[in-house]
Amino acid sequence: MNTWITYLLRCKDGTLYTGVTTNLDTRVIAHNAGKGAKYTRGRGPVEVVWWQGDLSHSDALMREAQIKKFTRAQKEELCRKDPLCT
């Protein structure tokens, strides 16, 4: 069974993107190659600023939906609590 990851990326323009994947490294490479989400195309390079792993697919999607409802300030606060944030 694959474990899933919910993640936040910071795009070159400073915006934040939330997504889910089973392989974060491969997914970031795809985003940076312009083959990830439509939103991140043209906004690269992107960098991971937060992630939560070891989730079921359902839990990862629910966490993604929750984060997408956050304000930008709430997303930034989530990042500040984690050492991945820059």
Image (spheres, rainbow, N blue to C red):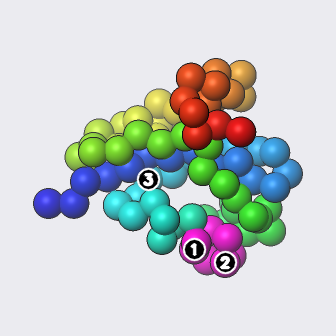
Amino acid at circle 3: Val
Q: Which residue is mark 3?
A: 20
Q: Is residue 69 visible?
A: no
Q: Are marks 1 and 3 in contact (CB under 8 Å)?
A: no
Please report the bounds of the magenta region as a residue range: 29-35
Q: Residues within 10 Å of mark 3 (few under 14, many from 20)?
A: many
Q: Which residue is mark 1?
A: 30
Q: Are marks 2 and 3 in contact (CB under 8 Å)?
A: no
Indicate which disc, 2 or 3, sits on the residue closer to the N terminus.
Answer: 3
Q: Residue at x 31, y 52 (%)?
A: 4
The question of residue 33 being in magenta is answered with: yes
The question of residue 85 being in magenta is answered with: no
Indicate which disc, 1 or 3, sits on the residue closer to the N terminus.
Answer: 3
Dot 1: element: helix
Q: Quadrant of the N terminus?
A: bottom left
Please say if 60 is above or below 20: above
Amino acid at circle 1: Ala
Residue 65, position as x, y percentages in the image: 46, 37
Please say if 16 is above or below 47: above
